[in-house]
Image: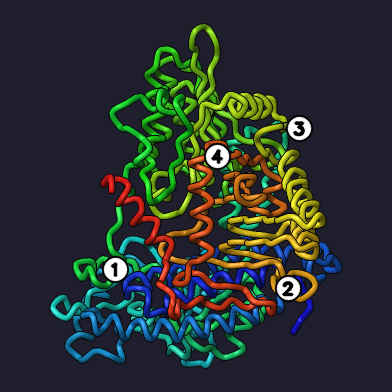
Amino acid sequence: MSDSIYMNRELSWLKFNERVLEEAESDLTPLCERLSFASIYQSNLDEFFMVRVGSLVDQEEVSPAMRENKTNMTASEQLGEVLRTIRTLNQRKDFIYAKLLGRIEESGVRLVDFRKIGRKESEKLERYFDCEIAPLISPIIVGRRQPFPFLRNKDIYAAVVLERKNGKRKLGIIPCSSGVFPRLIEVSAEEKTYMLAEELILHFMPKVFAGYTVREKSLIRVTRNADIDADALYEDDIDYREFMVELIKRRRRLAPVRLELSRELEGDIVRTLCKYMDVRKEHVFKNNTPLDLSFLYQIQDILRQKTELFYERRIPQRSAAIDSSRSMLEQIREGDKLLSYPYESMRPMISMLHEAANDEHVASIKMTLYRVAKQSKVVEALIEAAENGKDVLVLVELKARFDEENNIEWSRRLEEAGCSVIYGLDGYKVHSKLCLITRIEDGHAVYYTQVGTGNYNEKTARLYTDLSIMTANQDIGREAAEVFRALSMGETVREADTLLIAPHCLQDKVLAMIDEEIARARQGLDAYIGVKINSLTDKKIIDRLVQASCEGVKIDLIVRGICCLIPGVPGKTENIRVISIVGRFLEHSRIYIFGSGERAKVYIASADFMTRNTVRRVEVAAPILDPAIRARLLAMFDAMLRDNVQAREMGPEGAYVRREPGEETPLNTQEYFYQQAYEAAAGK
């Protein structure tokens, strides 16, 4: 048994993606939902290469001797382990995909290539290619007058080795991701048989390059580094929004960090492709699955009528604690209100915004936006408020990775409506989920504050588990007002008594509350810490948790993704338990618990325990002061600890093992919480 208590961040993330892949493999998951998990595994891996592998490649070039602070690995050592692990995972993915195709065929849908169809179908496809695809493709033969083309990030291309009669060889390239023709080509409507467009193009390459002999061919796909540090590139005399527009364009052209092939090619050809694209040979991957699995969602649509192949339909319910016929602000004034997504609807929070927008006594609405929906009712409510003459201040974080374009567009709309818009802070991302409504009552300013763990996004509120507290507690309101005052001045909050506010007043307060539990354990008193987060990488917090374990503090960690702390190591982390829940909904809520029973301090937060969250971002954690809500969150946390269907527990070797019900009653907490929401809404 290893006595290491640390796990490398990148390898821990790959273990998370392996848990996603397990859902594609599991017979507990309905067939069409397994297709989703296979596609999510691939899209997760794409982003991992674009961001994390890209960052390691940059670090290897700039600071090759630098070592990460947990496992002491250099960037080169991390890359080696990462690439080896991914090759192993991809072999498993290829096997799972082949198995899924067989199951799909049993359900009445076939995905074929030319080896699986007859002459009649081949002739039909050739006519389709000649009429519908050939006029739309743009073949390129690489030569002195035609340089190797720029390959767009994640697009699919057909690459072919061409030979003249004189023996000279050239390279041909055809883009296959035009978006003009469909990805799934119908072979037979009666038999629901389909072929991928790129396979059709690849098959008819000899027709495209007439006069050449096709010696080798493969589909290829390149993944580019998207790890741009916006703050490092930004200059004060440039309009920040226009700068971000240019930054997005630059991302599309960044250096490749992965080349994927659909077929084996001779070594000389692979080396040639690597040379043209400046890709290292060890970053080349041969796949036995399609290079882009997003078409699996189209397969789902074809099978949509077979409801037994999908999860049971679930609809967010109205909160039993809220009366939709009454004023939201009045109800919040009477007592704090908690919403638990996706089990409960986001509608009361949106109703609160619309009510504030039309309330003559409301003076201002202030809000931080990190990711919002494409058609955002939240932003529409803010625009409505501004058009009604309210003072509306919105911080739109333009550095929300991969959501920059959507946020840029919404920032323009907000400004046009008369909102005051801030684009973030120099050196810090604003990741908090904070809304502050100021209302004049009896001549005094009264605050109504909402703090959440997830984005103001109606779409993800149906897919992610998140928490949202709405309160009229004036201490919380005053500190929320201080957050917005600081943001409007380009500053960060330095002191806070009630809220935990990163970058200056969160990590230190978390450490202090851990110390309080350590002090109790030393006195022989009960001592407990419970944390639910997405990721754990902050070494200061990790080391303090290890110290707490050594002192006898019982610690439960529910960590969906990256966890750099290994539990159960004798004499070090034996009092720590780590579980991960991966299921139908993305676990996204953050809960901090310090102490047990009546003395437990409970918070919900936007921050994971990652250094980027605790000291490099503006984050807010709110205390849960209402006894009933506090008891509800403690019960939810306890239920998640007992999940024996979707939970995996990490052992002292760093491996995750899926829990099995055994003789116990099966408990899938996501289904359990939904059932509770249905019963509460029905008044049971």
Choose top left, top right, bottom left or bottom right for residue 580.
bottom right
**Left or right: 234, with 636 as reference point:** right
Q: CA distance from mark 4 to mark 2?
A: 33 Å
- Residue under the image location 21 percent in, 80 percent down: 108
Residue tagged 3: 494
- Badge count: 4
Q: Is the Cβ of the residue at disc 4 closer than 8 Å to that at disc 1?
A: no
Front in this rendered view, residue 563 or 526: 526
Residue 68 visible? The answer is yes
Amino acid type, residue under disc 1 in the picture? Phe
Q: Please tell me whether mark 4 sits on a helix, a strand or a loop.
A: loop
Q: Please tell me whether mark 3 sits on a helix, a strand or a loop.
A: loop
Q: Please tell me whether mark 2 sits on a helix, a strand or a loop.
A: helix
Q: CA distance from mark 4 to mark 1?
A: 32 Å
Q: CA distance from mark 1 to mark 2?
A: 38 Å
- Name which of mark 2 and mark 3 comes first in the sequence: 2
- Which of the labelled discs sits on residue 80, or is there none? none
Amino acid type, residue under disc 3 in the picture? Arg
Image vertical order of residue 631 relative to residue 567, above or below? above
Choose top left, top right, bottom left or bottom right for residue 289.
bottom left
Residue tagged 1: 310
Give the quarter of the figure containing the N terminus.
bottom right
Q: Please tell me whether mark 1 sits on a helix, a strand or a loop.
A: loop
Residue tagged 4: 433
Q: Nearer the viewer's eye, disc 4 or disc 2?
A: 4
Instruction: Give the crowd class for mark 4: few <14, some 14-19, many >=20 residues within 10 Å.
Output: many
Residue tagged 2: 78
Amino acid type, residue under disc 4 in the picture? Lys
- Residue under the image location 46 percent in, 70 percent down: 646
- Name which of mark 4 and mark 1 comes first in the sequence: 1
